[in-house]
């Protein structure tokens, strides 16, 4: 199974999960680069506003051919109860060519329900699985992050393997 993990991370929390997933799935990584400066307090305020109002942004070009993958796993932090503008932009620009999808979100406090529903709506696909980790779980400070990740990967693999001829490399990988 050729898998691509597409994600946006402002602080590194979502990147940490994307990196761990890539090991389990032997997946390629694509970090979305937002052309808008989101650093500092003003960047934080702008980020929350842009997410809350469902704004899009300009993301840097990337070399990956989305239609060459069997599955795309898309990750975002939850900002103001919504996905980041970078992930919104990616989904809007690629919905017509997305293969199977799965979603993961990291959050500090907002409910992820609207985020996951919005991602599913823009992708126009039901996800194979969803993973929700609060910041402490994502950074390994609380809970069992690796167990959550392994369960997410297992759910993806089980659904992919339901299709004749598909195999999932994640089942052959050793745990992190």
Image (cartoon, helix red, strand yellow):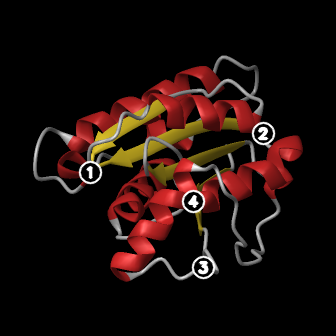
What residue is at 61 percent from the left and 59 percent from the top?
Answer: 85
Which residue is labeled 2 in the image? 99
> What residue does disc 3 label?
36
Task: Decide which of tag 1 and tag 2 comes sooner along the chain.
Answer: 2
Residue at numbered disc 4: 50
The residue at the far left in this view is: 142
Marked residue nearer the N-terminal end (1 or 4): 4
Give how far across and how far down residue 175 sits, in percent. Answer: 30, 46
Q: Is residue 100 visible?
A: yes
* Secondary structure under the numbered disc 3 in the rendered image: loop
Image quarter where the N terminus lies is top right
Tell me the mark number nearer the camera, choosing from 4 and 3: 4
Q: Nearer the viewer, mark 1 or mark 4?
A: 4
Label 2–label 3 contact, CB within 8 A: no
Question: Are the residues tagged 4 and 3 within 8 Å (C-beta)?
Answer: yes
Quadrant of residue 96 within the rendered picture:
top right
Q: Is residue 96 above or below residue 46?
A: above
Q: CA distance from mark 2 to mark 3?
A: 28 Å
How many marks overall?
A: 4
Q: Which residue is under mark 1?
A: 138
Distance from the alpha carbon under mark 1 to that under mark 4: 24 Å
Residue neighbourhood size for the residue with mark 3, other residues' Cα within 10 Å, grouped as few (<14), some (14–19), many (≥20)? some
Q: Nearer the viewer, residue 30 or 58?
A: 58
Measured Cα–Cα span from mark 4 to mark 2: 27 Å
Crowding near the residue tagged with mark 4, few <14, some 14–19, many ≥20 C-alpha atoms within 10 Å: some
At 37% from the left and 36% from the top, the residue drawn is: 132
Helix, strand or loop for disc 1? helix
Observer-side mark, 1 or 3, equals 3
Residue 24 position within the rendered picture, expressed as x and y whole percent measured from the top left:
43, 49
């Amino acid at each position: 199974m050729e898998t691509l993990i597409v994600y946006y991370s402002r602080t590194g929390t979502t990147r940490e999960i994307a990196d761990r997933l890539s090991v389990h799935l032997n997946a390629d990584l694509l970090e979305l680069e937002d052309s808008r400066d989101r650093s500092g307090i003003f960047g934080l305020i702008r980020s929350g506003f842009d997410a809350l109002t469902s704004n899009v942004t300009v993301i840097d070009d990337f070399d990956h051919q989305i239609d060459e993958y069997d599955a795309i796993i898309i990750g975002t932090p939850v900002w103001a109860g919504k996905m980041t503008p970078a992930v919104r932009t990616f989904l809007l620009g690629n919905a017509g060519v997305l293969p199977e999808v799965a979603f993961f979100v990291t959050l500090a406090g907002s409910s992820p329900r609207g985020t996951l529903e919005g991602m599913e709506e823009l992708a126009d696909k039901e996800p194979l699985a969803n993973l929700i980790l609060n910041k402490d779980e994502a950074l390994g400070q609380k809970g069992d992050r690796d167990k959550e990740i392994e369960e997410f990967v297992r759910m993806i693999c089980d659904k992919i393997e339901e299709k004749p001829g598909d195999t999932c490399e994640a089942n052959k990988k050793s745990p992190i």
